[in-house]
Amino acid sequence: MEEENGGLLVQSLIETVNEIASISDYRCSVKKQYCNLARRLKLLTPMLEEIRDSKDSIIPQQTLKALVLLKQTLDSAKDLLKFGSEGSKIYMVLEREQIMNKYHEVTSKLEQALSGISFESLDISDEVKEQVELVLSQFRRAKGRIDDTDVELYEDLLSLYNKTDDSAKDLAVLRRLSEKLQLLGIADLTQESLALHEMVAATDGDPGENIEKMSMLLKKIKDFVQTENPNLDAPAREKNLPPSGSGQAFADGSHKTPVIPDDFRCPISLELMKDPVIVSTGQTYERSCIEKWLEAGHDTCPKTLQKLTSAVLTPNYVLRSLIAQWCEANGIEPPKRSSSSGSNKSVSSCSPAERTKTEILLHKLASGSLEDQRSAAGEIRLLAKRNADNRVAIAEAGAIPLLVGLLSTPDSRTQEHTITALLNLSICEENKGSIVSAGAVPGIVHVLKKGSMEARENAAATLFSLSVVDENKVTIGSLGAIPPLVTLLSEGTQRGKKDAATALFNLCIYQGNKGKAVRAGVVPTLMRLLTETGGGMIDEALAILAILASHPEGKTIIGAAEAVPVLVEVIRNGSPRNRENAAAVLVHLCSGDQKHLVEAQEHGVMGPLVDLAQNGTDRGKRKAQQLLERISRFFEQQKHTQAQIEAHIQQPQPPTMANSGDS
């Protein structure tokens, strides 16, 4: 038994050394010492392999104790080296003394462990003995050595923290720090930010003054780097930007890259989010970034440091739509989500019993019995609502085509169960394409037109869920979904109106659907919702109008609907987001149409616009500034024209023919 334990111990030592050998580059402040330590430890592999392969499998007790100490110390060394490769660069400078103390403590214990190994009692070659003795002597020398530190780097960080009054000197310090710490790009800054997040997570959410200091220093460096290099993240975003020279201007009339709103950036990567998802604390992250965070073993929210009660990631469809709307308004192609590869496809973890139950329900769906179909659709509706595994398992079992076939059933209760089951199944990303591919859209539109109010509401919600996929927007719009959505927006319950509005908003992000919505009569309905007392639909109505106003037909119909007084009132008294959208609509109406400019000015828009330009959201400020400039230019032109007319009237008139004859 002792021999077996000794063999396992030696094998474990070899594996630990191999793990150390796989650790990549080290931070600049510890690079020399850590590279030396890793190199020396890798030289122990031949000795350990010869002990493992020795014919004499009995390891003396003294050597066994030394190997146990060596294993403990190697584990400590591995943690130290891993932190030296992945840890915070700023921390390693500020706390270098503490880090070097740990380094010397590890080297001292390694020297102690290796000294306890009796080479005479082990069957290893002379060459390997000499190699280990060389490593041992190097550890002895390193144990008492004190290397020079980069004093300037340390002092630069302290001076930056203490805030010097000399801004030019601050810039020089920031430049030196970003270069020496190799914090030169988005990837470097993101990695440093994650390293600090991990340190905070290790403190159970109580970061302390030092980590707060480091976070502040990182923010200063990050601001400097992004200011010095405004196109720093261009490679990551270039496919989302219009090509240079394309003649496509941004919404504010300039050709500069627009500033991405903070709400649209992932808190981890700082990039525009492609696939925003919500974690259990309510925070939103880019899916790939938060998945990496969770895969690394973290169970806290990176932003709030709260413990996550669940690892479930819920797609943030509303934010994704807002990002798409912002991209369109700024002439940027909306970011494309990476398509699900086979390796990433969700696979259910349902038990055999649960799978059997699903198969039984599918048999009932396929039967000719209305009672069986109704009960099966109802059970599938509830199962699909319960969790993600069920949604995957139900789709894998082949339920989607059977449910699609029941959408046209004359039995209202079965229809309600069926459309709601499809709505619940559509929450799963992989199921969205499967539902549309199964030919569900015409059936959903049928329910939207003919179903009970509950069924119509859930049909609208299903269309919204499916339209998150860009290509589905085209399919849904082309198959007649928009007119019945407009009808539901007009005559539905409060929930029905909300569902219809969110579906229409999402569908109208696609340019080809805007004209369909306008021709379906959505503008008069939206204007009525805007003026309803206590209607609760102002947010949705303005968001849709802001999209439609960019379409020629939309602009014409909105202008004819006497929208200007209503928009001016919203700019005066609305919420920040509504003021922004109202200004965006007004910008489109006033573009090339002096009548609306005069009307807006007559209704007192100037004061609210000045306030919006000073206190609104970023987009609201830009829209307000555009309107103020247009109004100013228009009235300057009016004054100039009036002055020319008056000057012409005051000029002496040439003699008439009659006067000429009298003389």
Image: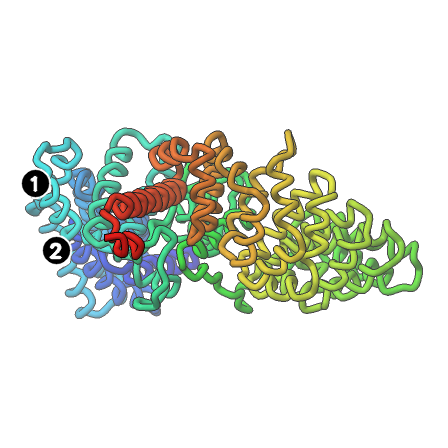
* Residue at image point 14% right, 45% down: 174
Q: Is 251 displayed left or right of 164 in the figure?
A: right
Residue 483 on image: x %, y % = 70, 56
Q: Is 606 displayed left or right of 128 in the figure?
A: right
Which numbered disc covers residue 138?
A: 2
Residue 352 on image: x %, y % = 74, 59
| Relative vertical location of residue 203 with respect to residue 75 in this rendering, above or below | above
Q: Which of marks 2 and 1 is in front?
A: 1
Which numbered disc covers residue 169?
A: 1
**Is residue 382 in view?**
yes
* Residue at image point 57% right, 64% down: 512
* Label 2 SS: helix
Viewer-side residue, 156 vs 349: 156
- Residue reaching furthest front? 662
Give the mark count: 2
**Is residue 112 in view?**
no
* Residue at image point 64% right, 30% down: 533
| Relative vertical location of residue 243 with respect to residue 450 in this rendering, above or below | below
**Residue 520, picture quadrant:** bottom right
Viewer-side residue, 248 vs 644: 644
Q: Is 141 displayed left or right of 272 in the figure?
A: left
Residue 264 on image: x %, y % = 42, 48
Viewer-side residue, 274 vs 358: 274
* Label 1 SS: helix
Q: Which of marks 2 and 1 is nearer the N terminus?
A: 2
Which amino acid type corresponds to the residue marked 1 in the rendered image?
Lys
Q: Is 243 displayed left or right of 143 in the figure?
A: right
* Residue at image point 40% right, 55% down: 330
Which amino acid type corresponds to the residue marked 2 in the rendered image?
Gln
Residue 614 on image: x %, y % = 33, 34
